Image (cartoon, rainbow, N blue to C red):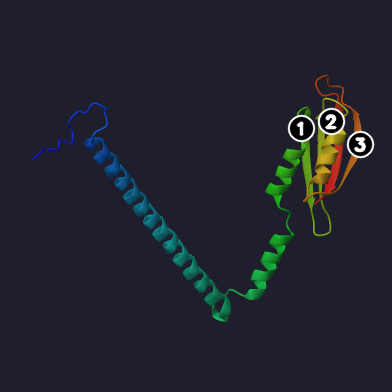
Amino acid sequence: MKRINFFGKRERGFNYGHMLMLVGGILFFLISFTAFQKYSLNQDQKALTKSENQLKHFKKQLGSDSSGVKAESILKVSGELFRQPNWPGVLSSISHSLEGGVWLESLKAENQEDKKEIYLQGVAYQTRLVPEVLKRLRLQSNLHEVKLNSTELSGNVSAPFRFKIEAKL
């Protein structure tokens, strides 16, 4: 009867011990991955159950007049929120429209019910940069009727041209 030495050296360098460790490593990885997936699924189920319970509670409050929460007030507040501009989106659009050699000095916004406008004032290193900024601002979906109000020499050597831009939100 021949004995098999699992950990003995062979001429090729790969023995049964290496194979056993490789199979064990693969099994360990698969078991760990399955356990992680199960844990992640349980966490998602808990979050979903919590959200469902909160939604049921909110629906119950909305339906009963004694809770103090009235549907009209919620609709009024949500309507007001939807009329507000998406400021992170607007600022991101302006940021992506500017390029090297153009700097904003001021940004002013009017956010009234009948008038939602934004005013930009800045300087440019070259005159050709101002029309490019205007073109990019006009391509932004959350800015409308973008127009150049004025351009003038600033007197500053590093940024000789001053501009004023107006846009509706």
State the image coordinates of residue 28 (x, y, percent, origin top left).
30, 46
Q: State the residue at coordinates (34%, 53%).
A: 35
Q: State the residue at coordinates (17%, 31%).
A: 8
Quarter assignment of residue 164: top right
- Residue nearer the viewer, 127 or 1: 1
* Secondary structure of residue under mark 3: strand
Left or right: 119 in relation to 58 = right
* Secondary structure of residue under mark 2: helix
The residue to which callout 3 is attached is 150
Residue extending furthest top?
157
Left or right: 154 in relation to 58 = right
Image quarter hosting the N terminus: top left
- How far is mark 2 from mark 3, CA to CA? 14 Å
Mark whose residue sits in front, 2 or 3: 2
- Whichever of callouts 3 and 1 sits on the residue coming sooner in the sequence is 1
- Residue nearer the viewer, 129 or 88: 129
Q: Amino acid at mark 2?
A: Leu
Mark whose residue sits in front, 3 or 1: 1
Cβ atoms under marks 2 and 1 closer than 8 Å: yes
State the image coordinates of residue 2 (x, y, percent, origin top left).
10, 38
Q: Amino acid at mark 1?
A: Glu
The residue to which callout 1 is attached is 99
The residue to which callout 2 is attached is 129
Q: Amino acid at mark 3?
A: Ser
